[in-house]
Image: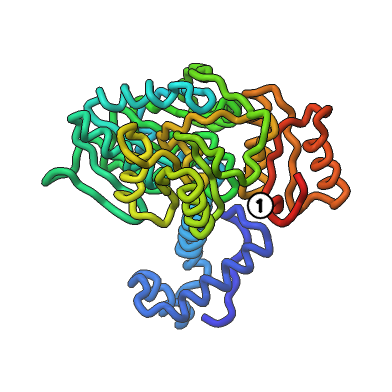
């Protein structure tokens, strides 16, 4: 069987594909240990010149067809052009979406949570572990059994799984093993994030809940509409306004920790900075400071938040990382003032904060970060320092702590 060729015909292969298929078929005949008895019989007859090699043609064509079917299966498995079909459990449901769009402190998440608490089963997808833990605790305090699932802990409140679960968005279930009446995807604008956005996209396409509430900035509406256009699912949009005004202070704190007021929150860059600021504030004001940062255990973070929120506790000031910007419920009531400087953690955060401050206050924001040319940084600093300019607020990285005169 080392040198036979079939005549052309009876197939749709191009000439080079036909030759390649014949070589593979010959290799199959020579190397496969358990050939079909009929093929073995034909080979024996060909060897004794009782049959022509064409007697193997039907088996050759079946071999080619089987390879084509396998290739089609591989193509189907590797087709990533329509992510919506990666989630059959969600596609089997007729899901309805309600987008609660608005700024911080507008009540958008409250309405979604009320629907979550009153449902027979539900899933809350949080942007942060501490927020997932807070909703878990709040749900159980309302008399609604709710489990907790994050990347670092799993809490089951009863002998069996509770009908409600609070989880980080990365940990949400998208399989067929469980469906929910109500789902909440919080801070949905994070689907634009280059590092974590895929978790929100996965939840948006795959969360197996019949009614899904999206909470977040109105800036995400167009993206959500485009994603849901691929699933042809209903989207209702509800707009919210801030419940209290956001104002920029007319003067900067400028390291005068004695000016810190009861109820203020100070955002720092690291655990080391948090405890350094905590020590200075407590020394200058006599207030005790609660601290919140990612490295704390969930229970400790929640306890620190509770102490800060409790008007009867001695913890009057909060020092925290930017985790508090992800919906953690803290009663920080200090207003942004003209002349204030807001420190962000990256260029992306700088421009997001700049947009929010300008939208909420009407002030223009100067920006300073390491990637700017020196001349531009100096010009932005000059505009912020100039009392006659419209740039009343500065948004910057911690470069301002390196001696820049502002």
Estimate the x, y position of residue 210 in percent, counting from the top left: 34, 27
Neighbor class of circle 1 (other Cα within 10 Å; few <14, some 14-19, many 20+) is some
Q: Is residue 150 above or below residue 355?
A: below
**Left or right: residue 344 compared with residue 124:** right
> Which residue appears at 21% of the width and 29% of the height?
142
Residue under label 1: 398
Q: Is residue 229 visible?
A: no
Estimate the x, y position of residue 36 in percent, counting from the top left: 35, 70
Q: Is residue 153 above or below residue 324?
A: below
View extreme (right): residue:
375
> Which residue appears at 31% of the width and 40% of the height?
166
> Which residue appears at 60% of the width and 44% of the height?
256
Q: 16 or 75, which is in the foreground? A: 75
**Left or right: residue 383 compared with residue 6:** right
Instruction: Please tell me in which quadrant of the rendered image residue 209 appears.
Output: top left
**Left or right: residue 66 compared with residue 134:** right
């Amino acid at each position: 069987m080392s040198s036979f060729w079939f005549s052309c015909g009876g197939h749709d292969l191009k000439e080079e594909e036909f030759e390649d298929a014949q070589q593979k078929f010959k290799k199959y005949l020579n190397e496969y240990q358990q050939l079909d008895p009929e093929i073995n019989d034909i080979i024996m007859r060909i060897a004794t010149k009782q049959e022509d090699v064409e007697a193997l043609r039907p088996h050759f064509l079946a071999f080619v067809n089987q390879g084509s079917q396998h290739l089609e299966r591989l193509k189907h498995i590797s087709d990533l052009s329509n992510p919506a079909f990666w989630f059959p459990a969600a596609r089997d449901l007729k899901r309805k979406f309600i987008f609660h769009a608005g700024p911080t402190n507008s009540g958008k998440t409250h309405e979604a949570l009320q629907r979550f608490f009153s449902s027979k089963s539900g899933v809350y997808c949080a942007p942060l572990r501490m927020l997932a833990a807070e909703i878990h605790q709040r749900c159980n305090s309302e008399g609604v059994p709710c489990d907790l699932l994050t990347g670092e802990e799993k809490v089951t409140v009863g002998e069996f799984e509770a009908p409600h679960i609070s989880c980080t968005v990365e940990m949400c279930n998208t399989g067929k093993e469980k469906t929910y009446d109500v789902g909440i995807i919080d801070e949905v604008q994070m689907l634009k994030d280059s590092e974590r956005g895929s978790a929100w996209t996965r939840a948006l396409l795959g969360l197996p809940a019949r009614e899904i509430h999206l909470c977040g900035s109105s800036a995400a509406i167009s993206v959500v509409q485009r994603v849901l256009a691929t699933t042809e699912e209903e989207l209702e949009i509800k707009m919210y306004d801030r419940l209290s005004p956001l104002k920029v202070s007319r003067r900067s704190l400028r390291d005068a920790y004695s000016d810190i007021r009861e109820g203020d929150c100070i955002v720092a860059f690291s655990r080391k900075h948090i405890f350094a600021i905590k020590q200075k504030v407590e020394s200058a004001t006599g207030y005790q400071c609660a601290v919140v940062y990612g490295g704390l255990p969930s229970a400790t973070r929640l306890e620190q938040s509770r102490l800060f929120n409790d008007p009867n506790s001695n913890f009057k000031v909060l020092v925290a990382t930017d985790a508090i910007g992800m919906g953690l419920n803290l009663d920080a009531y200090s207003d942004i003032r003209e002349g204030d400087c807001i420190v962000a953690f990256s260029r992306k955060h700088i421009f997001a904060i700049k947009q929010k401050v300008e939208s909420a206050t009407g002030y223009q924001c100067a920006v300073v970060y390491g990637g700017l040319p020196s001349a531009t940084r100096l010009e932005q600093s000059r505009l912020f320092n100039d009392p006659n300019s419209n740039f009343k607020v500065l948004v910057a990285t911690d470069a301002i702590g390196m001696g820049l005169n502002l």
